[in-house]
Amino acid sequence: MHFNRTLNFCATPVEGEPVSEAADAIELVLRSPRVVTPQGERPADVAVAGGRIAAVLPYGTEPPPGARLVDLGTDALLPGLVDTHVHVNDPGRSEWEGFETATRAAAAGGVTTLVDMPLNSIPPTTTTAHLEVKRAAARGRIHTDVGFWGGAVPGNAKDLHPLHEAGVFGFKCFLLPSGVEEFPQLGPSELEEAMREIARFDGLLIVHAEDPRLILGAPQPSGPAYAGFLASRPRAAENAAVEALIALARRLDCRVHVLHLSSAEALPLIAAARRDGVRLTAETCPHYLTLTAEEVPDGATQFKCCPPIREAGNREALWQGLLDGTLDCVVSDHSPSTADLKHLDTGDFGAAWGGISSLQLGLPAVWTEARRRGATLADVVRWMARGPARLAGLTTKGAVAPGHDADFAVLSPDESFTVDPAALHHRNQVTAYAGRTLQGVVRSTWLRGERIADHGTPTDPSGRLITRENA
Ligand SMILES: [Zn+2]
């Protein structure tokens, strides 16, 4: 079978309609026996024109003259991952991470779009002026596409609509101290005020859901015992916060997304609310799906995050929540700090910064555990590309389908590697995954038809700043 130089082709696409408005010549064809499309995995040739996917064609279609054919051998072709939960911390705490290092790590790990959290940078993304400072810091330095969440903090309800109009994807809030003083939590009346305001323009509230009263009432963490830290962040605190959020979302008809769910006990609450029509979504993270409390050594503060990594039984229940569709996305919650702030020397879980670095490792970490449970690459793509793209309303990201951006992750699914912190592009190489053997090696990453990383090495920064669609 042949296809024409332009998009008026004679070959029949495998699926979907070719993009009719585009008239760009096909510049690139990627060929793989395992192309992961929204309809499942199949052998196919993916034609790229003008940085977008022009068509998904039968495997072995002869490319048009002038188009470059890249035969991926036995490697799988996935959409570039969309990571909607990344703390870049730039400007202000760029010694923790930064736009350059974060997006280099993302590109090396198969992520092509990330959305930055509004806190830990100084300023936080709580006004349009602050958003401009963040954009200026990112411009010209990013290897992937980058967008921004706004923040809802006490006193900024009037800033939420302008931020929405300026293109943030939604608003993050905390119900208890966030860990940095310039991003305070919302009290009950402030939360309701923010939700009313966000509902008014049909925005999205994304929430760190732990109940402050129950955390305050739990034993305070200190010293190197992981069990002590775990007891300080009980499941009940997550469950109660999710329950309260559901009630508010229902009453105020506000779209709400639960961030980094760790307590699997909250899954039935979420599933029931959704059945009732409450506009609620939820995510979990690679560390909750791959690591367990039982295996965290005492003093190993690289495993500290909030909410915490829980027991093996809880992990299995989270997998069930993913497989049955209660959980929409798996995103990194990449939240690094300097090694000093992790207090690795004393191993004090009370003093250490809470956050796990995994931006570069999310895909192999999740794939390693997914395949063990009979899940497919198509499932992983649904959780790590499609789901987050949908959450952020990015209609041209997260799928190998005509009309989408030609963003790809090329994965060798059966190959394994041992995590060497020195091979990570993160600004700080502290990671809970050091020394673990993971399956799935990211061979290359592509953004709008250009290779942005090859065998773990990023090329020049060619990412763009993105905004909410229709902003
Ligand atoms: Zn976070």
Image: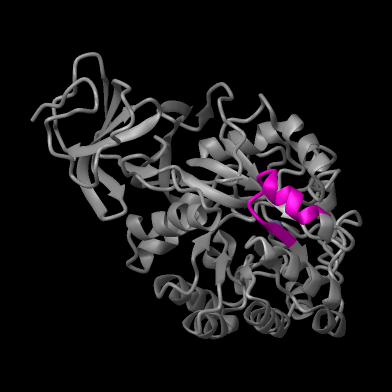
Q: Provide residue 181's location: percent of width, then percent of height.
A: 91, 57
Q: Provide residue 109's location: percent of width, then percent of height.
A: 51, 41
User: Looking at the rendering, which quadrant does residue 367 occupy?
Assistant: bottom left
- Return the residue found at the far left: 1
Q: Residue at x 52, y 28 (%)?
A: 457
Ligand 1 rendered quadrant: bottom right
User: Looking at the rendering, which quadrant does residue 154 occupy?
Assistant: bottom right
Above-or-below relation of 305 to 217: above
Above-or-below relation of 291 to 231: above
Colour setting: one colour
- Return the residue found at the far top: 66
Above-or-below relation of 289 to 386: below
Q: Which residues lie in the magenta part?
A: 159-172
Q: Is residue 62 visible?
A: yes
Between 221 and 212, the one nearer to me in the picture: 212
Q: Residue at x 21, y 20 (%)?
A: 5
Residue 162 on the magenta span: yes
Above-or-below relation of 340 to 221: above
